[in-house]
Image (spheres, grey):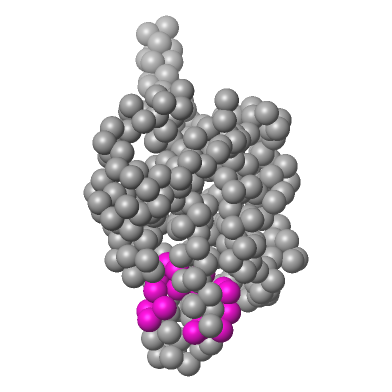
Amino acid sequence: MKYLKSILFFSCIGIIPILFYNAIHKSDLEPEIQTHPSYKIKSIKLPDNLNLAGERVPVEINDVKERMERELLVNTYWQSNGILLLKRAHKYFPLLEPLLKKHDLPDDFKFLALAESGFTDETSSAGAAGMWHFMETTGKEYGLEINDNVDERYNIEKSTAVAAAYLKKSKERLGSWTLAAAAYNAGNYGIARRLEAQHVDNYYDAKLPNETERYVFRILALKEILSNPRKYGFVFDKNDLYSIEETRTVAVDTVISNITLFAEKFGINYKVFKIHNPWLRENKLNNASRKLYEIKIPLK
């Protein structure tokens, strides 16, 4: 009996490490689904008609296919960001679309603006600001007023006119809208210098900085997803989306010494005034030159 107990004891000692090993490696031996059974992470099939401003994306090139798939996957499965971009696009695209048409810029460039700023009033770490994310030097070069009091990079109408001028100039120099979009990220000189050094004449054949190599593909991914949201799993009702308030324009060519008091004359507060006029950066408008400014006041 004593001998039998010893056998059982040492047998159990031998079994314990096996059980411990199996517990640790259970996921290897018997994988368990950690999410709801209906949740699936699917690969994405590239559409046949991918293009930017009518310029075809050569997805038959392996490198191009992989880079395009990367941005489609990242922007499809970053669900919280995707739904927010859809909401904001519904708010700002109706403002942008007629401006792009007015300035003879392809409609697809509204997705460049979305890729740049996400339609948020935030300044980048490099100092780019406004919907089109202009640097201060570029904005001033193209005639925008930029100082502590007024920053017209935040004026949608004026900054869109500058973006159109910049992009059309880039297209004229580089030969395509796709290269113009790349130059918006890396600069005309930077793109032209690399094309010349590498003896290539298009975006998809060029070896560019990593950010620029992803840039055009991100614009393309946003265009594809926002044009076909349900295809990529984004489900919403129309009233889930944001919309812009209707406004009227008030012309001002004088000093506004206190914007809070000025706003109250129109039945709104300082915060509401700034939401519609973010280009005014302080609680006053200096306007020593008596320049004519157009101020937006929301309709009741």
Residue 267 image offset from top left, x and y in percent: 46, 23
Left or right of 7? Residue 224 is: right
Residue 12 occupies which quadrant of the picture?
top left
> Relative to 42, does residue 184 appear above or below in the rendering?
below
| Residue 41 % position (x, y) | 63, 43
- Could you say which is closer to the camera, residue 270 or residue 43? 270
- The reply to whether residue 112 is visible in this rendering is yes
The residue lying toward the viewer, choosing from 201 and 68, is 201
* Residue 125 appearing in the image: no
Instruction: Name the residue at 40% across, 44% down.
Output: 252
Q: Which residues are magenta?
A: 173-190
**Image location (x, y in percent) of residue 169:** 49, 78
| Residue 48 position (above or below residue 83) | below
Image quadrant holding the N terminus, namely top left
Q: What residue lies at 29% left-to-right and 49% top-to-bottom?
A: 287
Q: Nearer the viewer, residue 166 or 180?
A: 166
Quadrant showing the C terminus: top right
- Seen in the picture, residue 195 relative to 17 is either above or below; the reply is below
Q: Is 132 displayed left or right of 65 in the figure?
A: left
**Residue 92 image point, x, y percent:** 57, 45
The residue lying at 58 percent from left, 79 percent from top is: 176
Residue 262 position (above or below residue 96): above
Q: Is residue 215 left or right of residue 178?
A: left
> Residue 235 lies in what quarter of the image?
top right
**How many numbered marks does the figure carry?**
0
